[in-house]
Amino acid sequence: MDTTAAIFAVAVFVPVAASLAAILLKPWPRLQTALGAGGAITGAAAGLYCAVRALFLPAPETWNSPWSMPLGSLSMSMDALSALFLIPLFVLFGLGALYAVEYLRPVPRERNAAIPWFYYNTLGVSMALVVVAANGLLFLVAWEIMSLSSFACVLHNHEEEGSREAAWIYLIATHIGAAFLLIFFLVAGAGVGSLDFASIAHHAFSPALRGLLFAIGLAGFGSKAGFVPFHVWLPKAHPAAPSHVSALMSGIMIKMGIYGILRSITLLGHVQAWWGFSLIAIGSVSGILGVLLALGQHDLKRLLAYHSVENVGIIALGLGAGVLGVSYGIPQLAFLGFCGGLLHVVNHAFFKGLLFLGAGSVIHATGTADIDALGGVIRKMPLTAAGFLAGSVAICGLPPLNGFVSEFLVYAAAIKGIGAHNGPVFAICALSIASLALIGGLAVACFTKAFGTVFLGEPRTAAAAHGEAGPWMVIPLFVLAAFCGIIGLAFWKLVPVFAQPVCILTSLPKADIVSELSTFAPSLRGIAIGCVLFLACTGAVYLLRKGLLHKRTVGASPTWDCGYTVPGPRMQYTASSFAQPIVLFFRHVLGPVQTKHMPASTFPKGWSFRSHVPDLLLDNVYTPVFRLAGGMLSKLRWLQGGKTQAYVLYIAMTLIALLVWNFVWPR
Amino acid sequence: MATLSLSTALSPTLALACAPLLTGIIAKTKAFFAGRKGPPLLQAYSDILKLLRKGAVYSTTTSWVFRAGPVVSLGALLACCLLMPFGALGAVLSFSGDILLFVYLLAVVRFFTVIAALDTGSPFEGMGASREVFFSALVEPVFLVCLLALSGPAQSFCFQDAIGKGAQISLVPALLAGFALVVVMLAENARLPVDDPATHLELTMIHEVMVLDHGGPDFAFITYGASLKLWLFGLIAVRAFLPLHAASVWIDVLCTSAGMVVIGIVIGTIESVTARLRLLRVPQLLAGAAALALLALLAQQGALP
């Protein structure tokens, strides 16, 4: 046990220490990069070892030590649920570091090359701490470090106005979320008298308080997870951050919100049915709205960010079904729902990491993230294109990759719910199935658009004709694609791994979970056989085609353009025109804005057309509310005059006030 | 249970052998309504064989994605055939949830057809692809809810129990789902009133325009794949209307085969007597189908009198 603790300490301290040391070595940027990346990769390897080990332990591994903070203790625990989050975390953390070695080059001379590494490594480590923290205060501290380090990562290009705005919105959003979490732990801890998770879990809350706590937790953790309506920071923050950070933020950090919800379910004990209903409802709305908003985007990374909203929606659909299964006592529903949701957490980390890294390579090579300015990138970047294609197939939930398996499980859960002979469960599960199907169809639309416009066809601008990324930026893509393939084809072998985490979530005996698992095993094996048959059929058709074309004339000619004589790249369908029918069909939800200057008169002087899909919630709700709040709070600005003496005075006054309070009302 | 049995190889063999015949029946029916003689019943076979004997010409814009499109699509459709029972004849691969694999394999077909179309850089193919993904996204929930209603009582979401020998659905939900499935079939297979397979104007096409640049064996794969897809959807619709429990497997197979002929004639008739809908009207048609599907699901649950 002590050796594991030591190895985990390596995972936590080495990345931070190495990058801290690197900051002092400004004259040698290569050494700084080596230290930053080396630290991250060492930490990731050590952490991965601990996490994989913890996955198979029957009892959680706990480490306790006292802490001088009131109500705080350095108590950590790594159970199978934490391990399930830690594995993709460390995989993506290590691969992202590998990728960033090349991605962050060249470093401008006036910059310190180690600073981005410090923030990145701190972000990775703090998320690991969030997952293992077993004390409310430690959890909040780790949470705050995570938020602040990711804020600093978003500010990477702080010279740009857009970047600063994005970071600002992110900072506000994350702190509103953190405020809810503070309330959550204060209210939970007040009844218990301790913030240790073990004591909270043993405390019997009244049903009303349990419900209240869940609602507060859902708001706080949901804002990190990016559920609608708390999603507005994602499409701002993800595009502004460097791509390896976006991958980590989208792949793992938003899952910390999911982890929080799951952990609070285990802490609060007996789940209530309405938690499941609200999770499924939120999941449907987030899923559909996320993919619709993604369809309207022109910026590749913004599009991917909205897809994260969609995917946390799918995760919520699974978890909601799981909660319903527990509260109505349907073990199979509970198992399938939680298993699907958890697997989608892992899967989304892999394919979204892959997509963000692929998008980063394209942006790195071409200098633009505007989908409509790209095109034909596959010719210069064939490897990146192949990786991005694998990610697109996976995120659309298509066989034989991993996205299909997790969506299959979520579907299977909803189908079980349909047959539960319970009116409300039937209704919400039917909603879940219809939403999943619609999300699936729209995701195909969105990713054929993204992949097709960026990588295929002719380059739309000169920027699109640049070369392939280097090996350090390609290898992580293929490693992640391999994970997607392995989970897709071999999940029926991997599924026992999920028994223990589901056991923790449902508080069902492990034997029950294992028996549910064995009744479901044939389906999972069936999927694997079906996928192998699909691959075999494809291979056979490929060989047939190869044989048929052998020794025949295979010519080349321009694309058929229906007789038009001067085809050009600008004639191609753009991403905006591709998505236009869907965006117009859902115009009441999306509120697309079109600015047209049509040719007029006999000799038109010029014309233009722009289309844009705004985030209605941001523009119509958040912006006015925050502008109002900002206006009112500016009246308090005199408090913050920038004079150190005044601040010292505030501190002194607070101390005196506290002393007086203690004197007047002694405990 | 996941069963992989070769004695059931008859259902995919029938699909592989007879799928182009269904297009022949449709063409004959349309010719009858137009007062023409029409192409021979086996014309589709000759077309496919002719294409298979040709070389190929590829656009200079295209990459390997364009070449992979037809191959992956046909591969996925062949796998779909392995999942589909023919009446009481079982499927090669059958397990609880195989319907989902089927639906998502069809999404693979769509994904690869669309990216192959976008690979040409042609605005026409982009247009077709855009419409295809739009309509399919709306069709997918309808299709799944229909299948859910059909597979209802068994809760297995398995073709065997939905439309195969284990089918035990009652008449009303079956009929409701059947009508919705006919709409789904027309929309997914580029038939009237959603898409006109016989049009000659690229601007108005959906499916045909996406495959404008394919030729030779690739186009043979696409044509054959399209007939397979129509066969599979037709089979689902036929079985929804035929929730029968025949005494013998062979009577069942005979009835289903007759049903396939009838569905060919029905499609031909629909194509002869309806005009194509404006593209903006198609979602309304699909909304109607969605309502039917939902009613079918409710009826199957016993929520309707």
Image (spheres, helix red, strand yellow):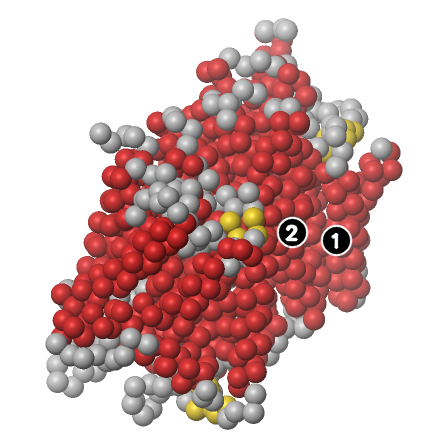
Please provide percent x and percent y for residue A393. 51, 60
Instruction: Confirm whether residue B138 shows in the render.
Output: no
The structure residue drawn at horizontal position 66% and vertical position 18%, both measured from the top left corner, is: A199
Q: Which residue is mark 1?
A: A40
Left or right for A537, reference A232: right
* Image x and y of residue B180, in percent: 26, 50
How many residues crowd mark 1 within 10 Å: few (<14), some (14–19), many (20+)? many
Counting residues from the start of the chain, the first of labels 2 and 1 encountered is 1
Secondary structure beneath disc 2?
Answer: helix
Mark 2: which amino acid? Answer: Ala
Taking the spot 54% from the left edge, 62% from the top edge, the residue there is: A534
* For residue A501, above or below residue A245: above
* Camera sees residue B168: yes
Query: Residue B175: where, in percent of width, then height?
Result: 25, 45
Residue type (three-letter) at the residue carrying disc 1: Ala
Residue A122 versus residue A295 in the image, above or below: above
Residue labelled with disc 2: A490
User: In which quadrant of the rendered image does the N terminus of chain B lie?
Assistant: top right
In this view, the residue in front, B94 or A170, is B94
Distance between mark 2 and mark 1 Cα atoms:
29 Å
Foreground residue among A67 and A6: A6
Chain letter for mark 1 = A
How many numbered circles are shown?
2
Instruction: For label 2, count other residues whose C-alpha is less than 10 Å away and answer few (under 14), some (14-19) or many (20+).
Output: some
Question: In the image shown, does A531 or A279 lie closer to the viewer?
Answer: A531
Marks 2 & 1, CB-CB < 8 Å contact: no
